[in-house]
Image (cartoon, rainbow, N blue to C red):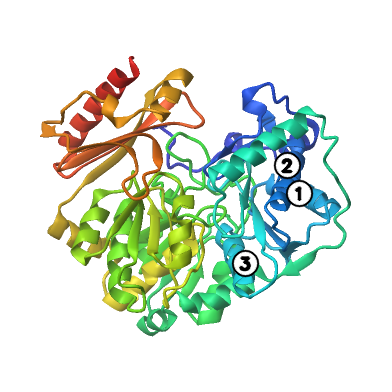
Amino acid sequence: MSDRAGTPAQESDLIDVEALTHAYYTLKPDVSIPEQRVVFGTSGHRGSAFDTAFNEDHIRAITQAIVEYRAAQGITGPLFIGADTHALSAPAQTTALAVLVANEVRVIVDEFDDWVPTPAVSHAILAYNRAGHDDQADGIVVTPSHNPPSDGGFKYNPPHGGPADSDATSWIANRANELIEGGLHDVAMAEPTAVETYDYRGSYVADLANIIDFDAIKASGIRIGADPLGGASVNYWAAIRDSYGLDLEVVNPHVDPRWAFMTLDWDGKIRMDPSSPSAMASVLDRKDDFDILTGNDADADRHGIVTPDGGLMNPNHYLAVAIQYLYTHRPEWREDAAIGKTLVSSTMIDRVAESLGRRLWEVPVGFKWFVPGLIDGSVAFGGEESAGASFLRRDGSVWTTDKDGIILALLASEIRAVTGKSPSELYDELTAEFGDPVYERVDAAASKAQKARLGKLDGDAIAAAELAGEPIVAKLSHAPGNDAPVGGVKVVTEHAWFAARPSGTEDVYKIYAESFLGTEHLHEVQAQARAIVDDALGQ
């Protein structure tokens, strides 16, 4: 934890936007250097132009690879594209448009030249594909999500509207690196003079009435604050307020690609993470001004929930409350619709699911796993411990298949309006019934070779029989919900668990741990988790 965490950014913390843009256009990647290759993580390709990790050549190559991929898949409909407020997003979108137009792809941009949140792109893709066209649409979102201002990001959403699976992203990344290595000779470019437009904001906001009970919110008269944290949702929140007549203040309507108004995150960096108390410090200063105060990251796929009585909620806590509320207030949802959670999310969700008589569907990290269930209604809610989630419309049909921080923020107001209690109060009721878990994520050092072994580790390779004084009841290397590899291991006892996964960007592995027996027991779990994993890795 940096000693400057939670303090306002200073001039020395801010990026030089002009220099960053210059680096985007002038620095040329060498794909023989691993850090300069195109690499798709769980949310696309990300990096800084200063590090020659996100530059014009990368975007030219990735876009051409997407063109070739969609052609091979028979995708001939329009491609919806939107970008967030990061400094590199606008130039990257311009580059992508030049490639798409040259390849005669029917590309659709925002009608008002506005920033476009991730959920609005997913919503647009699904709306087109539900309308009975002879072809299918897909999309690109230009965003590094909550990453620092120096970063850019680029992700592909196929016709199902959610994040592309690893087969697609691996093909796209490999082809992009081939194109760069070949000097980009096979990449077409043209002046993007004639592209179609679409009202992303108007279409998304008008449809929100089919997923959120605005009548209840308006009738309650609650005071709502929404902070876009300088991100793409800024004009969406104003439109939501005006469209539904809410007592809602857009707490910070300013957009600055340097994010000079932010407080620093836990490590002293500017990072637009609405689930981080340090990044949300200035927002928390206004918690007493509203019944519900929320935040979103730069592309609005994450949410942060602030209440007067509880401050910033832990994402796991809010997910549990949201699930308990939704599955008791959405009578048109299928009675057999499961509750989706990632393997590193809180066991409180398991206990809530059991009390509701609902099937729990536990999958590896990555929102892509929830896509099929959200589309067919067999999974009504999918959530990640990192404050990303989406759920079905009130009639039980699909809303978005990517994370939607806007609807999760609005749901907090609906919960407050309908129950008369804040989400924090409702979580306290859950802990009184099911116990009060303590949850934390820490990092441990690991070499690249050790990370590779951890990613392929089989649960049977763990010799330990006990964890922090309790018998181990499960050693998982595949997720219980879909039997997909978790890219690590999860070890479970009656009252605790830990999961270990290699970091995709640093020489560490992440240890997620939770205990229903208190903080001291959690620390025992964490210490023994390191020993167990180190033993399995031969450290």
Residue type for callout 3: Ala
Give the position of the C terminus as an image quadrant: top left
**Contact between labelled residues 2 and 1, with CB atoms less than 8 Å apart:** yes
Q: Nearer the viewer, residue 331 or 432?
A: 331
Residue 432 versus residue 329: which sits nearer the camera?
Answer: 329
User: Badge 2: few (under 14), some or many (20 or more) residues near its Cα, within 10 Å?
Assistant: many
Circle 1 residue? 96
The circle on residue 59 is 2
Crowding at dot 1, Cα within 10 Å, few <14 / some 14-19 / many 20+, comes out as many
Report x, y in % for residue 103: 83, 52
Point out the tag, 3 or 2, that comes first from the N-terminus.
2
Amino acid of disc 2? Ile
| Residue 177 numbered mark, or none | none
> Helix, strand, or loop for circle 3?
helix
Left or right of 78: which side holds 382? left
> Where is residue 468 drawn, in percent x and y?
15, 31
Name the residue: 57% across, 78% down. Answer: 206
Give the x, y percent position of residue 20: 71, 37
* Up-down relation of residue 384 to residue 441 (above or below): below
Task: Find out whether the residues at labels 3 and 2 contact each other: C-beta distance under 8 Å.
Answer: no
Q: Is residue 264 left or right of residue 358?
A: right
N-terminal-most mark, 1 or 3 = 1
Residue 519 in sight from this viewpoint = yes
The answer to whether residue 220 is above or below residue 393 is: below
Is 423 on the left-hand or right-hand side of 232? left
Say whether residue 290 is visible: no
Which residue does the image show at 57% across and 42% down from the upper left? Answer: 167
**Which residue is disc 3 drawn over?**
124
Q: Secondary structure at mark 1?
A: helix
* Amino acid marked by disc 1: Ala
Q: Find the distance from the CA under tag 1 to the CA under tag 2.
A: 6 Å
Give the CA separation, mark 3 to mark 2. 23 Å
